[in-house]
Structure formats: C-alpha cells, structure tokens
Image: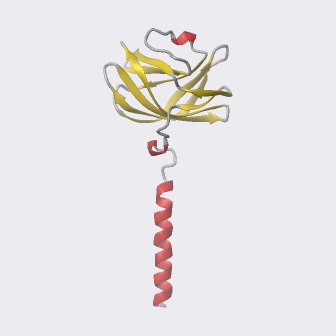
Amino acid sequence: MKTYFKISLTLLISLMISCSGDDNSNSEDNISNQILQGQVFGNDFTALGGKAFDSGEDISVNITNIAADCESSVLDYDLEISTYVTPEVGVYEGINVVFNKDGEAPLNYLDSIVEVTSLTDTEITVKIKAVSSSENTIEGIFTVPYCK
C-alpha cells in the first residue's frame, strides 16, 4: 500500500510540474526574440524600418517592411504594422495591433500582446505578438526611431 501511495504521489507531482508552464500560453515569455516578421494581408513581412511618435498621451509605433525613419511618411508604407503603447517599459495585453496594406481597409486585431522593452529619447524597442489569421500574423522584436 505504501508503494502504491508513493507511486501515485510521484505521478501527481510530475503531472503538476509538467503542466505549470502551460498556464500563460499568451504571456510575454512566449514572444519570439527574433526580428519582427510574419504575414500582412497574405504577404511575407519582415520589419526593416518605421518610426514612433507622440500621439496624445501614448506613443504611436509604426513598423514597415521597407527602409524608413523619422523623415518617412507612414502614409507611404505599402505594408505596415502599427499600435499605440503607453510611454513606459512594460507588457500590455489586449492591445490593438493594426495590419495595414496600401489600398486595403486596415485590419484591427484587439487581442495582441505588446511589450515595450526599451524606451529612450531617440528610439523604442517593442516585442509584438498578434495572430489574427494565417494571412495576418506577426511576432518578434524591433526597434524604431522615436521621432519628436
């Protein structure tokens, strides 16, 4: 009987330990540390440029797949990912990430995770995970200039 109890207890503890990491499947720990990439309106997307700027009390972060900086206009981006974040380092869940393609209506995905990992007077680094559909999915990390 003692052996049966020990085996049962060992299996129960093993099960609890193996499942404990699955509780936060959408947490910031699961956002890739690779460069921001994915699909935007079915097109391959890898972040290459963009810019961030003040928008009221928030920061508008705009990332595109072409070389772009503070001198660029976000209206000229063919493909773009954009979001608004609080101007401080932290993790924000349930954030709207907008998938943009020139000539298409923007697609808002309201259940995204955005982490501001670094914020200075000249640049902002964000990790984003937004999986709306197979045609609109983005994940990774990217730094854009903070234009004031």
| Residue 101, placed above or below residue 94 | above
> Quadrant of the image for the C terminus?
top left
Would residue 56 be found to the left or right of residue 35 on screen?
Answer: left
Task: Please state the horizontal and vertical placement of residue 101, each as a whole percent of the image.
Answer: 63, 18
Would residue 38 be found to the left or right of residue 125 on screen?
Answer: right
The residue lying toward the viewer, choosing from 62 and 57, is 62
Please tell me which residue is depicted at 38% across the width and 25% down the height of the picture. 124
Please tell me which residue is depicted at 52% across the width and 28% down the height of the picture. 96
Task: Please state the horizontal and vertical placement of residue 89, each as a whole percent of the image.
Answer: 34, 32
The residue lying toward the viewer, choosing from 77 and 25, is 77
Number of numbered discs visible in the structure rendering: 0
User: Which coloring applies here?
Assistant: secondary structure
Please tell me which residue is depicted at 58% across the width and 30% down the height of the picture. 109
| Residue 6, placed above or below residue 85 | below
| Image quarter of residue 41 | top right
Q: Residue furthest bottom?
A: 1
Please tell me which residue is depicted at 51% across the width and 68% down the height of the picture. 15
Task: Please state the horizontal and vertical placement of residue 102, each as a whole percent of the image.
Answer: 64, 14
Task: Please state the horizontal and vertical placement of residue 118, each as a whole percent of the image.
Answer: 35, 30
